[in-house]
Every structure is written in C-alpha cells, then in structure tokens.
C-alpha cells in the first residue's frame, strides 16, 4: 500500500497498489453514506433559488438516476439530477422542474466543475430531453482509465481511494416516484457526494497501473 495525502490536507489515504480488486474484498469494506443535508426539489421557483447557491461553488458532485427498465429495448429518461457540495445534496426531480434555463446555464459554465463518474452517459440521456452545451464536466472514470486502472466505476473507485463500500441496493428502485423514500434520497445523495471525496485522491495518485498486475486482492 502507498500512503498519499489529498490536496485538501485530509488524513492520509492508502492507495491499493493492484489493478483489480476482488468482489470479496470490496464487500468486506464498511459502507459509506452521505451524512449531510438532502434537499428534494420539485418546482421551478425552488430550483432557481438553490441553483443560485450552487453557482457560488467551485466543485459540485454530479449524478443522475433513472427509472429502471426490466424490458429489453425500453429505457427511461433521467428522473433525478443530483448536485452535491461537501455538506448538502440537491435532488432535482425532472418530471416537476424539467431542464429549465438556469440549469442549462449551470451545465454550460466552464467555471463550475461538475465532477461525476461515467458522466458521458448521464449527459447524453439529459440531452435527449433538451439539447444543451456542456462545459466544466470532469469524469473520474476517464481520469482513472488514463492511469491504467481497470475498474473505473463508482463502487471500485470508492473502495480503492476511500476504503469503504458504496452500496447499490436502491439503484433499481423507482426514481419517478413523487415521494422518494429516505433510503432513495440517501443513496442518490451519496452517489453525487462521493465524487467530491474521490476526486482529490485520484488526482494525487501517481501510480502507473499499467505496470501493476491485474490480480484480485484476497481477504
């Protein structure tokens, strides 16, 4: 294991110096959950007010959630956009707010860094609802892949850099519901917030994973 320090001077984190982690290892880690405030946004006036707050931030965690499909060939558009700071997660319900002009401006701003994992897929789904230009998006999966990391999803990056497990138990729940459960809100908030936690550690990782064996870690 290699010890590195994140740019925000947080406690040193261990970076796992193999290219592939086993499912058993990841499942052995403690679960990580967002502990801050979660705000559910379901009308335009409310959305505009909170977006003004978010525009003051330099870095924002980003993700979306869509209603799951259990039929081949049927896909649903995003139901939720998650935007998170270190302390607060904002969940925009798109069936209520739509992709309004202020949100388009936010997504088009190069000065606000929207940090996510696998962001291209999320962006493409949102652009099917309304076309807009995207600037300032940072995809942690792409940065990880450039370092030679094989497992570049949220669960694997959380395990590698935070030594915790990201639970996916609510991933296939119904995100189109007007009233989300507490478990859904916690899950959605964590998915966006975790990107802010991983980002500085990923940037600080100087390992060349193409030189490391893609072997599993035994418990």
Image (cartoon, rainbow, N blue to C red):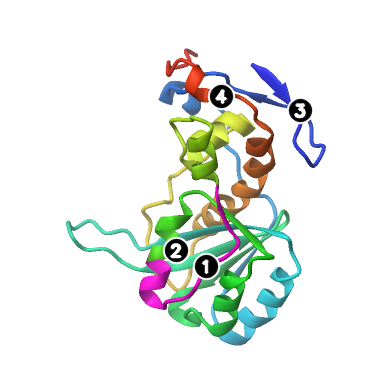
Check disc 4 and report its element: helix, strand or loop: loop
**Is 71 or 107 nearer to us in this picture?**
107
User: Nearer the viewer's eye, disc 3 or disc 1?
Assistant: 1
Q: Quadrant of residue 40?
A: bottom right
Residue located beneath label 4 in the image = 208
Q: CA distance from mark 3 to mark 2?
A: 33 Å
Label 3 crowd bin: few (<14), some (14–19), many (20+), radius 10 Å: few
- Label 4 near label 3: C-beta < 8 Å? no
Q: Quadrant of residue 140?
A: top right
Q: Position of residue 87 (x, y in %)?
A: 73, 56
Q: CA distance from mark 2 to mark 4?
A: 29 Å
Q: Quadrant of residue 71?
A: bottom left
Q: Is residue 179 above or below residue 23?
A: below
Q: Residue at x 66, y 75 (%)?
A: 51
Numbered label attached to residue 134: 1
User: Nearer the viewer's eye, disc 3 or disc 2?
Assistant: 2
Q: Position of residue 9 (x, y in %)?
A: 82, 37
Residue located beneath label 2 in the image = 123
Check disc 3 and report its element: helix, strand or loop: loop
Q: Is residue 126 above or below residue 181?
A: below
Name the residue at the right extreme: 9
- Magenta segment: 125-139
Check disc 1 and report its element: helix, strand or loop: loop
Along the polypeptide, which appears first: circle 3 or circle 1?
3
Q: Residue at x 57, y 72 (%)?
A: 108
Q: CA distance from mark 3 to mark 1?
A: 34 Å
Q: CA distance from mark 1 to mark 2?
A: 8 Å
Q: Residue at x 77, y 39 (%)?
A: 7
Q: Position of residue 63 (x, y in %)?
A: 51, 58
């Amino acid at each position: 294991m290699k010890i590195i320090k994140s740019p925000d001077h947080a406690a040193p984190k261990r970076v796992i110096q193999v290219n592939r982690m086993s499912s058993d290892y990841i499942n052995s880690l403690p679960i990580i959950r967002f502990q801050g405030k979660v705000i559910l946004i379901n009308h335009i006036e409310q959305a505009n007010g909170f977006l003004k707050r978010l525009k003051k931030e330099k870095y924002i965690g980003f993700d979306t959630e869509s209603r799951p499909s259990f039929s081949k060939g049927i896909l649903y558009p995003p139901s939720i956009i998650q935007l998170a700071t270190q302390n607060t997660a904002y969940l925009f319900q798109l069936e209520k707010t739509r992709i309004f002009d202020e949100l388009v401006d936010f997504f088009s701003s190069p000065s606000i860094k929207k940090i996510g994992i696998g962001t291209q897929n999320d962006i493409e789904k949102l652009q099917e609802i309304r076309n807009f230009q995207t600037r300032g998006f940072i995809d942690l999966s792409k940065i990880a892949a450039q370092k030679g990391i094989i497992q570049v999803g949220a669960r694997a990056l959380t395990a590698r850099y935070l030594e915790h497990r990201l639970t996916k138990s609510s991933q296939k729940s119904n995100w189109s519901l007007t009233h989300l459960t507490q478990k859904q809100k916690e899950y959605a908030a964590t998915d966006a917030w975790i990107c802010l936690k991983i980002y500085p550690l990923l940037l600080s990782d100087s390992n060349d994973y193409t030189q490391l064996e893609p072997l599993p870690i035994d418990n």
